[in-house]
Image: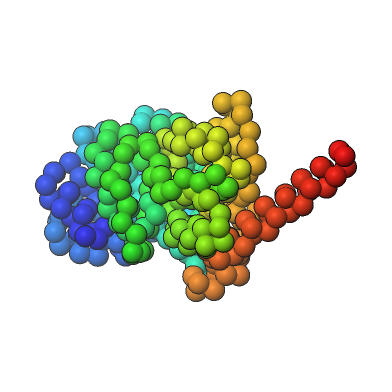
């Protein structure tokens, strides 16, 4: 099943759903014919769309709104915060081409701060499915709640079959004593490859799909830090405000610490290219992730040997 098919089925089954877009129909091309006047295209007016969605929500509707992630979360940020977040209205935000999925576009179209922005809004929930299978398993719950939600839409198909979604829970793929990789969205695919590569090198590897970033599964992180020597965060997002920040906040909250190696963009935008070339250039392929982890651990081992020799 596709995103569009799932949304069509949900909207036809319940009149409360209104599908909206700011002239971005890539995900919903066939829905206008199915829904008639319950499909609204406001044009290139993300702020107007959010304001209208808030009004509809106040009248008992559940708007599912669509726009390019960079413009949805930044151009309409104040409207999302004020019209949706403050009154906690059940508007569901579908962000199209977030992170590296905006591969061929320049900085204006690169949404690399969306997780930071959306999770900073009180009442707003934040989700980042790993692929289309994950997306389809998560959305029925997300759409059914009375809370506002932001979803990093990811319709890539992968061979991986995900577990059913449990609200607020991470998907534990594996546990490991050497390293645990934490990932979300598009980067789950590469993290799975990295975990396979590391296992072939004899490492005990954990992998966690953090499909929900707010609410965040704190216990999954704490369990991983208790069991693994190294925690690795992998995200197509700026270092500030994303998963790396969430991990730091959570560990501080629980008065604990961990050795954490982050993969993120540190105050720079990515070089536009086709997705495989982009990820290779930025160092985010599964093999590159695994090689950097191996190099990091080897460096730590050498440091431990030096310290032991010095102590003697």
Q: Position of residue 21 (x, y in %)?
A: 31, 55
Q: Quadrant of residue 42?
A: bottom left
2 on left or right of 273 = left
Examine the rendered structure and indicate whether residue 248 appears above or below residue 203. Answer: above
Residue at left offset 32%, top offset 52%:
162
Residue nearest the observer in this picture, 227 or 60: 227
Where residue 30 sits: x, y (%)?
A: 20, 64
Q: Is residue 271 left or right of residue 199?
A: right
Q: Which residue corresponds to the image point at 56% horizontal and 66% vertical from the top-left?
A: 287
Can you name the residue that lies furthest to the front here? 312
Q: Is residue 169 above or below residue 20?
A: above
Q: Relative to residue 63, is residue 37 depicted above or below?
A: below
Determine the residue located farthest toward the left in the rendered image: 13
Q: Position of residue 63 (x, y in %)?
A: 27, 44
- Can residue 82 be seen here? The reply is no
Q: Is residue 281 visible?
A: yes
Up-down relation of residue 218 to residue 37 (above or below): above
Judging depth in this view, the residue of 218 and 302 nearest the camera is 302
Look at the image and tell me in which quarter the N terminus lies: bottom left
């Amino acid at each position: 099943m596709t995103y569009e098919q799932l949304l069509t089925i949900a909207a036809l089954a319940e009149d409360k759903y209104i599908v909206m877009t700011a002239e971005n129909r890539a995900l919903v091309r066939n829905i206008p014919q199915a829904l008639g006047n319950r499909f609204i295209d406001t044009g290139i007016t993300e702020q107007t769309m959010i304001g209208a969605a808030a009004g509809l929500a106040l009248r008992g509707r559940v708007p599912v709104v669509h726009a390019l992630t960079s413009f949805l979360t930044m151009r309409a940020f104040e409207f999302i915060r004020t019209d949706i977040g403050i009154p906690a209205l059940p508007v569901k935000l579908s962000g199209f081409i977030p992170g590296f999925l905006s591969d061929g576009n320049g900085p204006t179209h690169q949404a690399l701060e969306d997780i930071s922005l959306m999770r900073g809004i009180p009442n707003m929930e934040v989700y980042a499915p790993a692929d289309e299978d994950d997306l389809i398993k998560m959305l029925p719950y997300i759409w059914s709640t009375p809370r506002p939600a932001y979803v990093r839409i990811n319709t890539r198909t992968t061979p991986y079959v995900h577990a059913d979604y449990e609200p607020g829970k991470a998907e534990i793929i594996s546990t490991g004593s050497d390293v645990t990789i934490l990932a979300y969205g598009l980067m789950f695919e590469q993290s799975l490859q990295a975990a396979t590569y590391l296992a072939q090198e004899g490492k005990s590897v954990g992998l966690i799909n953090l499909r929900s970033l707010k609410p965040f599964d704190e216990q999954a992180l704490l369990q991983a830090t208790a069991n693994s020597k190294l925690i690795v965060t992998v995200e197509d997002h700026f270092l500030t405000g994303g998963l790396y920040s969430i991990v730091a906040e959570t560990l501080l909250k629980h008065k604990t610490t961990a050795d954490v190696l982050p993969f993120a963009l540190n105050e720079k935008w990515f070089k536009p290219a086709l997705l495989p070339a982009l990820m290779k250039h930025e160092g985010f392929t599964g093999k590159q992730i695994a090689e950097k982890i191996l190099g990091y651990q080897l460096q730590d081992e050498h440091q431990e040997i030096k310290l032991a020799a010095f102590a003697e």
